[in-house]
Image (cartoon, helix red, strand yellow):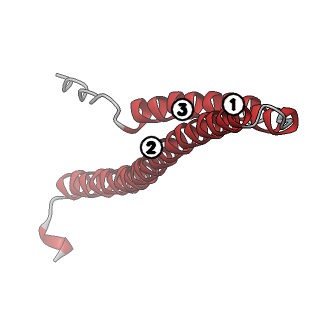
Amino acid sequence: MDGYWHPELKQKLERIEAQYAEINAKLERILMSQSDIDAATQALTGAATTLTGVVSALGVVATDLGTVQANVQAEIAALQAANPTVNTANLNAAVSGFSAPLATLATAVTTLQTADTSLDSVETPALVSPPAPSA
């Protein structure tokens, strides 16, 4: 069958086939890169969701511990008012010991919220316009 083709036409067809194979190889690499990007996006989305849950839970814990501290302080004050001779200095000191860890926890929650916001901006990138076709 090769004898039916003009040699110059056969060379051009071979070059076209080679270019076609090269284009297909590049397209496969692009598609593999896209699947990597999709997997990374999915992982970032999962991490952002987890981080949002952690930040929310820590915020609730910090609030609850602050409420517990205030309630215990109120009970100590009530105990002291009802029994003025009872020495509550050690109880007061123990309860006030929650203040520094609660402040640290509040700072950690704020830091995590900032990280979560930053992660949100990475997980949803702006669309990039394709280049204009060359003439």
Q: Position of residue 27 (x, y in %)?
A: 32, 52
Q: Amino acid at mark 2?
A: Thr
Q: Position of residue 52 (x, y in %)?
A: 45, 43
Classify residue 39 by image quadrant: bottom left
- Give SS at disc 1: helix
Circle 2 is placed at which residue position? Answer: 52
Screen quadrant of the C terminus: top left
First reached walking from the N terminus: tag 3 or tag 2: 2
- The residue shown at (56%, 34%) is 112
- Cα distance in 3D space between marks 1 and 2: 43 Å
Q: Amino acid at mark 3?
A: Ala
Instruction: Tell whether 58 sits left or right of 53.
Output: right
Q: For the residues carrying marks 3 and 2, which lies nearer the camera in this image? A: 2
Instruction: Tell whether 56 sits left or right of 107.
Output: left
- Cα distance in 3D space between marks 3 and 2: 10 Å
- Give SS at disc 2: helix
Choose between 101 and 69: the one closer to the eye. 69
- Give SS at disc 3: helix
Circle 1: is it few (<14), some (14-19), or many (20+) Cα within 10 Å?
few
Q: Position of residue 28 (x, y in %)?
A: 35, 57
Screen quadrant of the N terminus: bottom left
Where 102 sits versus 52, above or below?
above
Circle 1 is placed at which residue position? Answer: 81
Q: Amino acid at mark 1?
A: Ala
Circle 3 is placed at which residue position? Answer: 115
Choose between 49 and 20: the one closer to the eye. 49
- Cα distance in 3D space between marks 3 and 1: 46 Å
- The residue shown at (87%, 37%) is 90
Instruction: Tell whether 50 sits left or right of 16.
Output: right
- The residue shown at (53%, 37%) is 63
